[in-house]
Amino acid sequence: MDNGNDQQIDVGSVVEAVSADHSFGAPLYVVESMCMRCGENGTTRFLLTLIPHFRKVLISAFECPHCGERNNEVQFAGEIQPRGCSYHLEVSAGDVKIFDRQVVKSESATIKIPELDFEIPPEAQRGSLSTVEGILSRAADELSALQEERRKVDPKTAEAIDQFLSKLRACAKAETSFTFILDDPAGNSFIENPHAPSLDPSLTIKFYERTPEQQATLGYLTNPSQTGQSETSLGTPSTQTTALPHGTIGATAGHRAIAQSNSTDISDNLFRYTAPEEVMTFPSTCGACAKLCETRMFVTKIPYFQEVIVMASTCDDCGYRNSELKPGGAIPEKGKKITLSVKNITDLSRDVIKSDTAGVKIPELDLELAGGTLGGMVTTVEGLVTQIRESLARVHGFTFGDSLEQSKINKWKEFGARLTKLLSLEQPWTLILDDELANSFISPVTDDIKDDHQLTFEEYERTWEQNEELGLNDIDTSSADAAYESKEPTKLP
């Protein structure tokens, strides 16, 4: 990285570079900084770069010519993601190739190995770009750094650490099976999937809503003194006068309330079926700044489908907006598979309701997305394909890295071209929604759903494993059913 053209600049120029929208060709910045080991001045080099199909990162490298101290760090120049992410990588004994997977660990991520009861907290390792083997080796080196001093002061602790290091190094050499967990509330960490765009049998990805504590750690929680509110106002209702509700009872207020939410798809698609009879407004807490806000909710019936609940929240303090679509009614006894044969431009405009539990398949591309990958959404067929394309581009990083084989690069380019051709309708293709809870829906283009021959619905019995994953095997309603059956109607005198 060192060359004669490096120029000394201030940190302000680096900040401007991070703020600018540079995708490629960003210059290398060199800043004079103090070495924390010897106290002399060294140099820190900053490079803003874009990891293909991931996001922008700021790579910094420090080097001291006086004592030889060197270190590097990766920081994210983009925004914090809407949800946190959790990667579970199952490592089998003897599987050496899995240790070459590249790992992006942000400064807010935690690494865990449950089998060893081992955890690397966010403050222990800074943001880094490494591999599974590199992270484990670095952890082992840091634990063994002061072992000689520990043996002199506390021999028992040193002996226990030696025993743990032997187990950790055994994991790093694939001598034993273990689970590598990368959990990041900011959603900016990543583990490479070498089988992309196909599913990885060893890797499980889950996205989750952050807790108030995680929001505060990421800096979302505002200072109550700055807004003139007491600290107790975060957890208890305020006694001061609040603003009037955004929505009141009635269909007109429902249109106005949902229009303030994040997604316009909900209002565009759901209101073409039925308008809400009543919009309910109740107090809640903002998920971003923890201030009191209001949530609006209404229930509507979609023909040929079922009852659904639409919820929308808006915070006047920080401007956070959120909308959700939840299924109503009882849990269906069977799962449902919906198959649509896409043949013309009208099919791309069909309304699609995809629940959190629905998986998506496109057989012509050998593409399969597990349930929960894209979350719940109200969109169209064209919008769903666009979401799949953007999700693959965002999640499956390192697609065109320098270390990737040319055959894999060509494979990714070919797959991206085939995915784009779906929307041009050069040839018919098939869209399959497989929902274990039967809470997904594709709208027909005919007045009677039976006359739509391009759309088929198939019900199936869920397996025991599917019910176990959904938590249905542990539900016991026999006592409640018996109580309702034995209850006699009240007789009037």
Image (cartoon, helix red, strand yellow):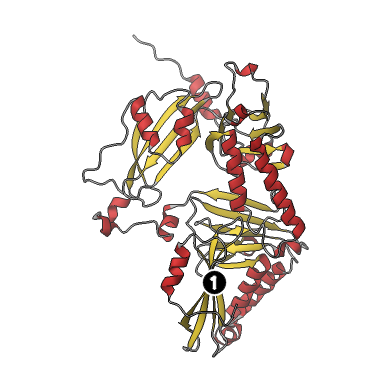
Residues 338 and 205: in front is 338
Q: Which residue in the structure is indicated by mark 1?
A: 73
Q: Quadrant of residue 147?
A: bottom right
In the rendered structure, the answer to whether residue 164 lies left or right of residue 92 reads left
Q: Residue furthest front?
A: 5
- 420, above or below 181, in the image: above
Residues 218 and 77: in front is 77
Q: Is residue 212 visible?
A: yes
Q: Residue furthest top?
A: 493
- Give the structural element (helix, strand or loop) at label 1: strand
Residues 422 and 87: in front is 422
- 189, above or below 155, in the image: above
* Residue 245: x %, y % from top left: 29, 36
* Residue 475: x %, y % from top left: 57, 35
* Residue 212: x %, y % from top left: 41, 53
Q: Residue at x 42, y 36 (%)?
A: 311
Q: Give the mark count.
A: 1
* Residue 44: x %, y % from top left: 51, 78
Residues 204 and 101: in front is 101
In the rendered structure, the answer to whether residue 287 lies left or right of residue 404 reads left
Q: Is residue 125 visible?
A: no
Q: Residue at x 72, y 41 (%)?
A: 365
In the rendered structure, the answer to whether residue 226 lies left or right of residue 129 reads left
Q: Residue at x 69, y 45 (%)?
A: 417
Question: Where does the N terminus fall, quadrant-wise?
Answer: bottom right
